[in-house]
Image: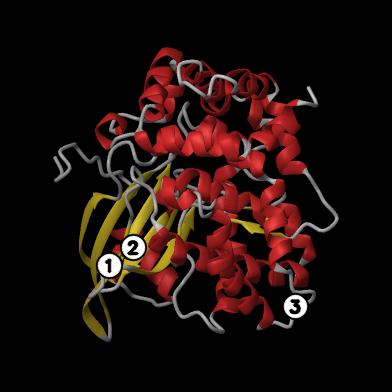
């Protein structure tokens, strides 16, 4: 048993020989001898749907130094029946490709004025016995996660917006120098194949219908019920039109693609306890598209209701200055204006609406209820609906939903008028 109260099964591959290879490859050294290693869970139950994380502390010797310590997060992705779609759609291999081809380029560019990493260092990538990523454990460097249930306040969003702005700006430089690289990262989680997958329909599409039913019982919001049903009935077409829209003046960046609380690790100031840096993890949804995709995903899934209402002010206050400062370092032209940035975001407001209904009920679910969450639950319609309703009844979801529907009603009306 572990401290979390559940049994941790350590896989056969996680042994001394495996760890020695990871250290030798990652640190480019030879003759490493692992003396001892200790494995604990890398995440709490119900917090990680698509992989198993092993936090591993390794003590090792090498010929000229002894008593060395290194800390890994080992991300193991065995492809069972529940994860078959992840394999089919190539999300796992995409993340591997991001770590191998894109993140090193971005980090090299950002080292010009950013000493902190955008992502953990990747020490090793294996495909046998299944997909395995061996990453730097940022907890050993003072990083930790935030509370997904309550979401992010302005202080947390400040460091996220500043860092993702640098990430986006650097990716524009990478793309301008290597245009062909876009071909490997041209789509995120929403494609013609995925939007009709039962997993997507059990979350994104089904949640729109549940929301429509729920709104009938909320005074003053009854009018939104048929509007959500229109979104539900035409979900696949609507979401594909949003993500595949290609405006001539789009600001195309590498979108992280899954920009929400559990994919952030924060470093806090020792005295003030306020966040001062963040790194991003999980790159299975990364793709080149308008920056409006990432920004809307971030706010719809991760912002506390009170700061959700300051979306554009926070973009102006934190994102835009960091974005322009970074892009100017490389003499990139033309430099987008603040209005250019806000236009990108507003054009994808429907993405905000769909992610809020599709994801926030799960993201804001209380931790006791979510302990048993995994992908297999979406195959059980009754269980999936019960869990979704728990999330939809949370105060955070209700406040965020009401605000979003009122502010984005015209966006919704314009979309559904086409059907």
> What residue occupies the far front of the structure in this picture?
220
Image quarter (top left, top right, bottom left or bottom right) of the C terminus = top right
**Dot placed on the residue nearer the N-terminal end, 3 or 1:** 1
Q: In this view, does 291 lie above or below 121?
A: above
User: Distance of mark 2 from mark 1, alpha carbons?
Assistant: 6 Å
Residue visible at 36% across and 46% down? 148
CA distance separating discs 2 and 3: 34 Å
Of all residues shown, which one is farthest toward the top? 382
Secondary structure of residue under mark 1? helix
Front residue (pair 402, 168): 402
Query: Which residue in the structure is indicated by mark 2?
Result: 137
Q: Nearer the viewer, residue 172 or 334?
A: 334
Q: Position of residue 7 (x, y in %)?
A: 19, 37
Looking at the rendered image, the disc whose residue lies closer to the viewer, 3 or 1, is 3
Read off the residue under disc 3.
332
92 displayed left or right of 52: right
What is the C-alpha distance between the residues marked 3 and 1?
36 Å
Instruction: Name the residue at 41% across, 28% down.
Output: 392
């Amino acid at each position: 048993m572990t401290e979390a109260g559940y049994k941790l099964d350590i896989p056969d591959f996680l042994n001394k020989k495996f760890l020695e290879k990871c250290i030798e490859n990652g640190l480019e050294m030879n003759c490493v001898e692992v003396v001892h290693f200790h494995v604990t869970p890398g995440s709490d139950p119900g917090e990680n749907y698509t992989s198993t994380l092993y936090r591993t502390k390794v003590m090792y010797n090498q010929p000229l130094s002894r008593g060395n310590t290194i800390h890994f997060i080992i991300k193991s992705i065995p492809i069972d029946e529940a994860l078959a779609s992840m394999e089919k759609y190539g999300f796992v291999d995409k993340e591997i490709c991001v770590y191998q081809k894109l993140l090193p380029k971005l980090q090299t560019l950002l080292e010009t004025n950013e000493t902190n990493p955008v992502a953990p260092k990747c020490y090793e990538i294996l495909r046998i016995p299944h997909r395995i990523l061996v990453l730097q454990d940022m907890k050993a460097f003072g990083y930790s996660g935030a509370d997904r249930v309550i979401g992010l306040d302005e202080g947390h969003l400040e460091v996220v917006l500043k860092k993702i702005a640098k990430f986006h700006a650097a990716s524009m430089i990478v793309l301008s120098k290597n245009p062909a690289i876009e071909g490997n990262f041209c789509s995120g989680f929403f494609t013609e194949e995925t939007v009709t997958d039962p997993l997507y329909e059990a979350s994104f599409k089904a949640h729109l219908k549940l929301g429509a039913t729920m709104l009938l019982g909320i005074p003053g919001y009854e009018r939104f019920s048929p509007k959500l049903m229109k979104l539900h009935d035409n979900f696949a077409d609507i979401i594909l039109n949003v993500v595949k829209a290609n405006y001539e003046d789009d600001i195309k960046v590498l979108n992280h693609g899954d920009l929400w609380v559990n994919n952030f690790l924060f470093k806090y100031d020792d005295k003030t306890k306020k966040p001062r840096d963040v790194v991003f993890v999980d790159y299975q949804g990364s793709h080149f598209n308008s920056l409006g995709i990432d920004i809307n995903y971030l706010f719809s899934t991760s912002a506390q209701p009170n700061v959700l209402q300051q979306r554009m002010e926070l973009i102006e206050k934190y994102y835009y200055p960091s974005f322009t400062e970074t892009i100017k370092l490389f003499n990139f032209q033309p430099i987008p204006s603040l209005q250019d940035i806000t236009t990108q975001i507003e054009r994808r407001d429907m993405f905000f609406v769909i992610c809020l209904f599709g994801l926030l009920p799960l993201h804001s679910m209380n931790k006791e209820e979510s302990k048993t969450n995994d992908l297999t639950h979406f195959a059980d319609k009754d269980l999936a609906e019960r869990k979704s309703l728990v999330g939809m009844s949370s105060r955070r979801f209700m406040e965020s939903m009401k605000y979003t529907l009122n502010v984005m009603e015209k966006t919704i009306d314009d979309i559904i008028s086409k059907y």
